[in-house]
Amino acid sequence: MKFVLGRLLSIAAALGLCFAIDVFAHSQNDYTQRLVALAGLYVTLSVSLNLINGITGQFSIGHAAFYQVGAYCGGFLSVRFYDGSPVHGLLWLLVMMAAGAAAAAGAGLVVGLPSLRLRGDYLAIVTMGFGEIIRIIVQNVDAFGGPYGMNVQPKFLHIWLIWLLAVSCIAVCRNLVSSAHGLQFLAVREDEIAAGAMGVNVTRVKVTAFMLGSAFAGAAGALLAHFEGFITPATFAMDVSFIILTMVVLGGSGSITGSVISAAFLSYLPEYLRGLKGPEGGTLAVTGASVAAALFATIIAAGIIRRLLDQARGTPRSRALGVAGIVGATLIGKIVIQWGLLFIPYLRELKIEAGQLRMVIFAVTLIIVMLLRPQGMLAHHELSWAFIGKILGIKAPAKAVTPA
Amino acid sequence: MSLLEMRKGTIHFGGLVAVSEATFAIEKGDLFGLIGPNGAGKTTCFNMITGVYRPTSGSVYFKGKQITGTPPNRVAALGIARTFQNIRLFPALSVLENVVVGGFLRHRTGLASALIYLPSAIAETDRLRAEAMDLIRILDLEDVADVRSADLPYGKQRRLEIARAMATQPELLLLDEPAAGMNPQESEDLLRTVRRLRDDFGKTILLIEHDMRFVMNLCEKIFVLDHGEEIAFGPPEKIRNDPGVIQAYLGEAV
């Protein structure tokens, strides 16, 4: 019964974590609560997209569509049938999640089918088109409120449930890749023809990945609808798809922990930047010249560091010193460039509040990460104890493989 | 009944006739060589057998059953495994994982049990890993079992492809230029390994090879293709002295 005990312990730990997050969030103001909830939803979305993109290698960039299908399915059913339904409260919400997941999985099947014949860029275009089609259809259906959106009743503020979905999504993906089944998915990503020749049913693997990934996105959508109490087609515009995709790529395509970390990071960063303050606590305002100079200097520096890292010459220590030197040179370079730019009257006069720069800083952060580490933060690794040990130079005891 | 029979297998790519009415039969336990100059249609024959291409006309029989046009994954399940001329491993996966993919055909648990990680799924994964490890030992890849397959030297990648194909437990193993790019020592080792696969494991082997010494030393029957057509068939001694074969390889006598 070691298994049952271990499993119960992990479930208890997961629930404990989710309730801890819930308690923390509810002790904060509304704004922070919403942030914690959205971070949970984004974790689900990016981990489920990672299953399609990173693990199975099907380049899908329309993930917001599945999110939307789930949200509208759950929202619409609640509006129509909640009054007079025999189930209430949490149970109803779970039913809505299941409905959203099922509807999104159906949509996943529809998108998964063309993926059997399409690869790479071509598939990306189809998934993007699909995402737009869904959004535009919803926008034009009066029952869904058209472009004005839809009020969803009842509202639920179960942040723990949002995070429980995220944890389940992580668990399912992790279970998949650590079992022999998951190797099939990875094999399809690596080489479809070879996978087929080894007896892998490539069709089934691809469609399964699409359905499973979209089901999680759909469940997340249903939760969003009931958490916010209001959804519009604009909530699921193409930029949401791109942000989810960015999370997957930034974390390292194929790495589950990478997706989790970058989802949390990227959903927090723009909100953190919103509150940028000056040194005296007042609103920080900078000249256009300063901003432009900082942008130039940072991106050039990132490019130089990239070259330096590529050459892989010298000891790690000398390379670290080199990077530090470049960072110092960047600060000086920024001042020099800024001095030059101050001759341009427009840039001299233009005053920008730091808060307005948040999306610029967001974008620059992405550019820098991609320049310095194009394979993503964790690349294909997982942030496991063994991996941490490897970085620190501790060798984990090898898992014994006994002959059958 | 032959293990594999190709009956008038013909394949056209637009106006080009890649293989024309190739007819041969492979018996159980054969070491069968398929040779011919570049572009003769050897790999196309492999692709016809394994379902990558559907023959324009003609048919393929495996153990007396028609398998013409069966999709590759079903062909693999029936008991035909192959390697590729330009190695096609799963580069980011480790050696062990590559072989486990080949063994997956014999897994017995459903996807759902893997997703919730039931003990049965864990046990099944462990079983497949252990089986894969046995094959890795046979092909002498034990020391690199946990290395990413893309990081292996060329000769070992070729051996890994054979291990992965063996993991599907095929009756018929198709090897597409297994000795290509190997030095004499490596190809000598490979020769012994392939012979062992037949003698000790009872596999039937069909192989394409350009290294004549390799083919002549290993194969008992050789089928020669040129421009998609059969030009000779027989034991190595006969092929070695066949004027048609010599002409195909060396051109017209001066």
Image (spheres, rainbow, N blue to C red):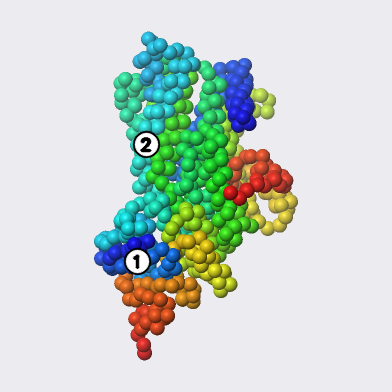
Q: Amino acid at mark 1?
A: Ala
Q: Residue furthest front?
A: B1
Instruction: Write the residue at 52% across / 27% down.
Output: A165
Q: Position of residue A21 (x, y in %)?
A: 60, 23
Quick one: B16 or B61, which is closer to the camera?
A: B61
Quick one: B232 or A149, which is closer to the camera?
A: B232
Q: Amino acid at mark 2?
A: Leu
Q: Is residue B133 left or right of residue A148?
A: right
- Mark 1 vs mark 2, foreground winner is 1
Residue placed under numbered mark 1 in the picture: B25
Callout 2 environment at 10 Å: few (<14), some (14 to 19), or many (20+)? many
Residue A12 appears in view: yes
Q: Position of residue B78 (x, y in %)?
A: 39, 53
Q: Secondary structure at mark 1?
A: strand
Q: Which mark is residue B52?
A: none
Instruction: Write the residue at 33% across / 68% down.
Output: B24
Residue placed under numbered mark 2 in the picture: A109
Q: Residue furthest top?
A: A84
